[in-house]
Image (cartoon, coloured by chain):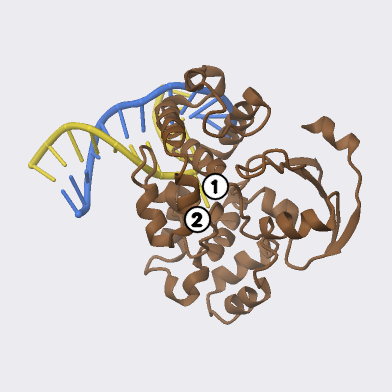
Chain colours: A brown, B yellow, C blue
Amino acid sequence: MGSDVINMEFKNTRTINNLDLKQIAESGQCFRWEEVDESTFLIPGESYECRDREPLLIRQKGNSFDVSCSDEEWDSYWRVYLDLNTDYEAIGRLIMNSGDDHVKECYELGSGIRILKQDLWEMIITFLISQNNNIGRITGSVKKLCNICGHFPYPGDIDIACLENRELGLGYRVKFLQDMYLYGQEHPELLALLPKLSYAEAMEELVKRNGIGPKVANCVCLFGLHHVEAFPVDTHVRQLLDKYYPSGFDYGYYGSKAGIIQQYLFYYELKHKGN
DNA sequence: CTCCAGGGCAGCG
DNA sequence: CGCTGCCATGGA
C-alpha cells in the first residue's frame, strides 16, 4: 500500500478541532493506518459495502488537515469514519465538570482521540485476533492477513485453511477465525443485521460466536457499530480501574458516552507503560 | 528462565 | 453462578 502514496496528492484542506491523527493511530483501535511521517497517515478505504474505495492520505498541521479525497467522498464516508458528527467539545466539558482528576489528566493527554467508525467485519476479525495478544502482534497478523488477497479478507475472500499458516502468527485463535469466516459465508445477513440492533441486542448476538466474549464484543460495538456507550475492559483497563478507581468508576456520569472516556483512559495507560 | 499481551472456553465446585 | 487451567506466540 505504501507505493500508493507517491501517486496521491492533496486536493483539499479542512479545519477540524479535537482531532489528532497520531493519538488515534496509537490509541489501539485501528491496526492498519500507515504512518507516512509523524503528521501524515494513509488510511485504508475499503469496506464490506465498498471494496474499491480509495485510501485516504491525510496530513495534519494543528487543526488544519490536507486530504486526498473529493468533497463527495469526504461527506459520504470519511466524515463519519472520523466521527466528525459527534460533539467532542461537549464531551470535553463533561470531563472538565466531572471532578475526576484522573480523567482530566487523561483528556489533557489524548484530547485529539475520536472513536472511529470502522468496518464491522474487520473489527470482528481484528478483535478476535486481539484476545490474549499485544498490539504489535495484532498489527502484524492483520497486515499479513491482508497480504493474502490484497485487502482485508471478507467472508468468501480466502480459503480458511490458509489461516493455519504459521506465518500469520494467529496461534490458538485460528479456530475462532475459521469458525467466524465459515459463519460469515453461511450467514451473509449477519453484517446487515448487526447495525440495526441496539447495543444490548448487538452484544447478545455477537457473544454467540465462538471466541467472542464480552470484551471482544464490546470492542466490535464501540469501533465497528459506534455504540459509544460500550466500555471494553481488557487487561489494561482492568489494571487502571483497580489503580485509580478502587472504590468504583462512575460509568453513570458519562452515560451513553462512557466508551469515549474509556478510550482516553486506555490511551493514557498505554502511554505510561512506554508504548 | 518467567511474565505478559485490548480474553475466552471448558471443566470443575 | 464463580473460579481455574489452558490455549500459541514472540518480545521484554
Residue name at image x 49 percent, y 27 percent:
A170
- Image quadrant of residue A41? top right
Q: Is residue A250 visible?
A: no
The percent position of residue A127, horizontal first and vertical second, equals 50, 42
Q: Left or right: A273 with respect to A26? A: left
The C terminus of chain A, quarter of image: top right
Q: Are marks 1 and 2 in contact (CB under 8 Å)?
A: yes
Residue nearest the observer in this picture, B13 or A274: B13
- Is residue A17 something one can see in this rendering? yes
Going by the numbered disc 1, the residue's amino acid type is Leu
Quadrant of the rendered image containing residue A226: bottom right
Q: Residue A94 appears at what percent x and percent y?
A: 58, 78
Q: Quadrant of residue C7?
A: top left
Residue drawn at x 53%, y 75% as measured from the top left: A100
Residue where numbered disc 1 is placed: A120
Q: Residues within 10 Å of mark 1 (few under 14, many from 20)?
A: many
Q: Nearer the viewer, residue B1 or A26?
A: A26
Q: Does mark 2 fall on the same chain as mark 1?
A: yes
Tell me which amino acid carries mark 2: Pro
Q: Give the residue displayed 64% in from the left and 43% down from the top.
A: A47
Q: Is residue A198 left or right of residue A15?
A: left
Q: Is residue A274 above or below residue A225?
A: above
Q: Nearer the viewer, residue A158 or A93?
A: A158
Q: Residue at x 39, y 65 (%)?
A: A246
